Image: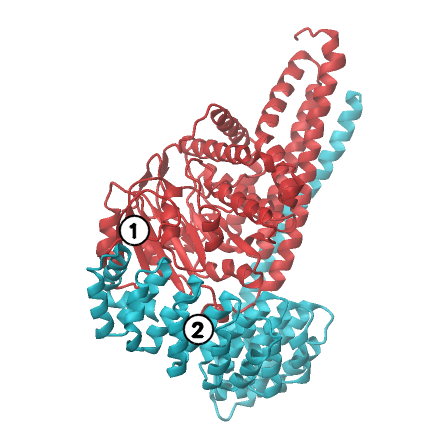
Amino acid sequence: MNDSLLLTLGLRVLAVETAMATALVLLVMFAASAGEWWRRRRLRQLSTARDVMARLLTSETPAHADETVLRALPVGVQEALVLEFGRAVRGVSVERLSTLGQRLGITARAEARCASRFWWSRLQGARLLGALDHDCAALRARLNDPHPTVRVEVLHWAAGRADGHVIDALVARLVDPERLCRFTVRDSLLRVGQPAAGALAQFLARDDSTALADALQVARGLAQPELVAPAIRLCGHPEAMVRARAVSVLGALGGDDAASVLLERLQDDDASVREAAARAIGEIGHWGLASALADQLGDVSFPVRRESAISLRRLGSVGVLVLRRAKQSSNPFAADMATQVLDLPDSVFHRIAA
Amino acid sequence: MISVPSFVYSMIFPVFDRAIFAYFVLLLLSYGILVAAALWELIGHVLRVRGESRQWVLGSAVSPSISILAPAYNEEATIAESVTALLALHYANLEVVVINDGSPDRTLEVLRDRFALVPVHTIVWRRLDTKPVRRLYRSKTHPNLVVVDKVNGGKADALNVGLNLATGDLVCVIDADTIVDADALPRLARPFLADAATIATGGMIRVANGSQVAGGRVLEVKAPRNPLAGMQVSEYLRAFLFGRLGWNELGGTLIISGAFGLFHREAMIACGGYTHDTVGEDMELVLKLRRRAYEAGQRHRVLFVPDAVAWTEVPETVAVLGRQRDRWHRGLADVLWRHRRLIGNPKYGAMGLVGLPYFLIVELLAPVTELLGWVALAVWVLMGALNAKVALLFFAIAYGLNAIHGTLAVLADELSFPRYRRTRDRLMVIGWSMLETFGYRQLTVLWRVRGLWKFLRGRTDWGKMERRGFAAPTVVAPGATSSPPGPTRAPA
């Protein structure tokens, strides 16, 4: 290629580059200035609107003028306010927010958004309806939304709806293909609380259920009596993780049946199950099993020894006595662990044992 | 003008010309693909997380527990403030493990006094082999704080001790002087909740020089006035927003900065923790994690999270920056050499076929090729083999591309998770990015080539790092624990 052609080509490339660089710099400045202007404007609007909204949500007889002020705000600001207040208010204020949302037309718009073909629009619709504590078919249908981010939002909202249909849908979602959805389902079921126990017990009792470890984690948090029987049954499950979680459910529930199963599980082949059993014995406070825990202080697994020592201290004076004796043990592992756990400051021990 | 034999004109010049030109095109193509992939990923990420409430993740009983490992060496001036800030991070189930790596100063005494530490019987589950632990402490006032005093063994050894002690499902690795944004942990943990295959996530490291810092938090973000620090702001933005984020879409990143990363604890222990005898221990760990996953046939993900932010102080003197870059490049060379069998190996999927060849050809060899290019350009012009105007034009084109790359990074930052509030700061960052090509870039090329040369000669020392500190001056001695934010591998 000769020099003149190179020069011509090069100059053209340079001209394009210069134009692009200049455009980008201008774009940065425009984006920054527009963003800053928008943020300031939004802040100004929000600061006034927040006072108005707070008055509307706390007053038994809301002033018409306040509502007119909100109505005059841009839709984006109205929605931002709803999302902000929806996360912060409880009780009667939620009902007032919900009514206000309907009067301002935010609810209707959000319902329409739930049917959008764009997932981010459906997501915003679900967020708004969740903040407004609104229940409708459009939102319930999103429990099966094809996009996981939207499902997560609706599954989170479902925690505030303890009716049979929603609970069944939540339990069914324990096997959701998306992990974030499964995480949200567990969180939501825990927040639903006692009403979810029946459906969960049925799920655990079925032979074809998968995601048993996740379901047992919820069962432990719910700690309802109807979950004892399925948990005891699952203590014999072939999967070690399921056995460990089932044992921890028994730790949260207690009872004589549980104690005998826990004693048996202290001899499990898998260290994680023995660890969970040792912890569970401390949780149910069964001091009759202190000697079994003392034996576990010499277990080959470090976590089992640690949990056994912590559980012994948790048992109170009987356990502490066993630990003090273990300090003189001929087994150095048992002696070391007993010494360390007895050394722990109370605040640390309570955190570990919690 | 130097006289040149005719065969040089006819045979050597054209071959060399084409080789350099082909490399230039390869470089452009790879950056173009990385930028496109990064922008695509950034848009998706912004849509997913903007407006998302993190409260339910924070407060949930089923959230994974996190242990923060903070290695410290001679940090007496800042350690109390740093640990207080870590304990105040927004995450419910959090444990902070501070590893005093045999500091000869008062680091341990400061911790003991400030956090009411009491010694407990020292037994540690030694799943990883480390230098001996001298003493283990628990705090009466902060039950989630663990402090361990150990014999000096370097950063990797300190982190391995922390791994032996940590009880969290996930382990967050930071430098003791890194400032972590209060809400960065739930953001960094999100990919672990979203996909069980996630084994590591890395956060965005931003430059804190020039910003207002107090109480272990960055209060007001400002662009640095020091030219070296300013140019590093632009370099970090490019390296993280494009260099790291782009890899999320192209088979997973290979580097998680040692200054701020979150890992699956069991996966870390299973691959043997950090390697002691390398200066690129952060990249080495990620490669080991991924290599093990590939060999076990496990699906795995290593992701960069652009909105999880930690702040660091970057070097402001030529000498310190030179040592840092030299070390980073030695680390890169060392890690690639250790895992040379993986390069181009289809058994290791995208990592073997795309990631590692990219790091070898584009990242490791880029400074050598660039240096050769500069030398050749000078020789060509001296020999009269190249028109000075063409040479100048070539330089201008390369400069223009760099300016576009830098400005695009600032724009992506501005449109996604902007931190600068003042127009002046944005202009300063763009300005530093424009000035990079004049001197700074050539210096980094020389430092990286020096690093490569030292690697070939078998040098493995860290070099002395000096930090001004946010609160007071700190000196980090050779073999030190506290390190800069790992190999950023800023693109050209």
Query: Does the rendering let one see residue B148?
Result: yes
| Residue A326: image location, x then y, percent | 23, 63
Tag 2's secondary structure?
A: helix
Task: Classify 10 Å Cα crowding around label 2: few (below 14), some (14-19), many (20 and above).
Answer: many
| Chain A as rendered: colour | cyan
Do the residues under discs 2 and 1 have CB atoms within 8 angstroms? no
The circle drawn on residue A247 is 2
Taking depth in this image into account, of B156 and B487 the one nearest to the observer is B156
Q: Which chain is home to disc 1? A: B
Query: Does the rendering let one see residue A45?
Result: no
Taking depth in this image into account, of B135 and B462 the one nearest to the observer is B135
Residue shown at 33% from the left, 62% from the top: A306
| Residue B18: image location, x then y, percent | 73, 24
Q: Which chain is red?
A: B
Q: Amino acid at mark 1?
A: Val
Q: Amino acid at mark 2?
A: Val
Tag 1's secondary structure?
A: strand
Figure check: A331 above or below B133: below
Q: Which chain is home to disc 2? A: A
Of badges 2 and 1, the one in the foreground is 2
Residue shown at 65% from the left, 28% from the top: B395
* In this rendering, position of residue A269 left or right of residue B479: right
The circle drawn on residue B148 is 1
| Residue A104: image location, x then y, percent | 62, 84
| Residue A70: image location, x then y, percent | 58, 80
